[in-house]
């Protein structure tokens, strides 16, 4: 999962999450493990709900999405 998380750093939302963890003071490896855990959580949610992955679209607020 850590290799998949490393590859996902090209995605802007994953990269922003990684940068946020780095800004919190986590080292590179720890931030990457946090990203891998987040991706596991997303996979588990997809399996639980039966819905495909739908990344958040930038520029759309919660009020506009509803």
Image (cartoon, rainbow, N blue to C red):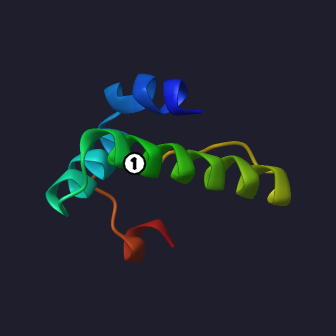
Of 55 and 21, which appears nearest the observer? 21
Of 32 and 60, which appears nearest the observer? 32
Q: Decide if residue 45 is on the left or right side of residue 55.
A: right
Residue 24 vs 6, above or below: the answer is below
Where residue 52 sits: x, y (%)?
72, 43
Q: What residue is drawn where x is 64% and y is 56%? A: 41
Q: What residue is drawn where x is 39% and y is 41%? A: 32
Q: Decide if residue 50 is on the left or right side of residue 15.
A: right
Task: State whether residue 42 appears in this view.
Answer: yes
Where residue 17 sits: x, y (%)?
32, 51
Where residue 5 sits: x, y (%)?
47, 33
Task: State whether residue 56 appears in this view.
Answer: no
Find numbered disc 1 in the image and state the secondary structure of the residue it sits on.
Answer: loop
Q: What residue is drawn where x is 51% and y is 24%? A: 3
Residue placed under numbered mark 1 in the picture: 57
Q: Residue reaching furthest bottom?
A: 63
Numbered label tally: 1
User: Dot 1: within a 10 Å radius of its alpha carbon, few (fewer than 14), some, or many (20 or more) residues?
Assistant: few
Q: What residue is drawn where x is 33% and y is 25%? A: 10
Q: Decide if residue 47 is on the left or right side of residue 38.
A: right
Query: Quadrant of the rendered structure where residue 49 is?
Result: bottom right
Quadrant the N terminus occupies? top right
Where residue 8 sits: x, y (%)?
43, 29
């Amino acid at each position: 999962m850590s290799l998949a998380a490393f590859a996902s750093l090209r995605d802007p939302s994953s990269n922003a999450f990684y940068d946020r963890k780095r800004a919190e003071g986590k080292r590179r490896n720890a931030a990457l493990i946090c990203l891998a855990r987040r991706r596991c959580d997303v996979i588990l949610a997809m399996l639980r709900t039966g819905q495909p992955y739908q990344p958040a679209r930038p520029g759309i607020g919660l009020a506009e999405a509803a």
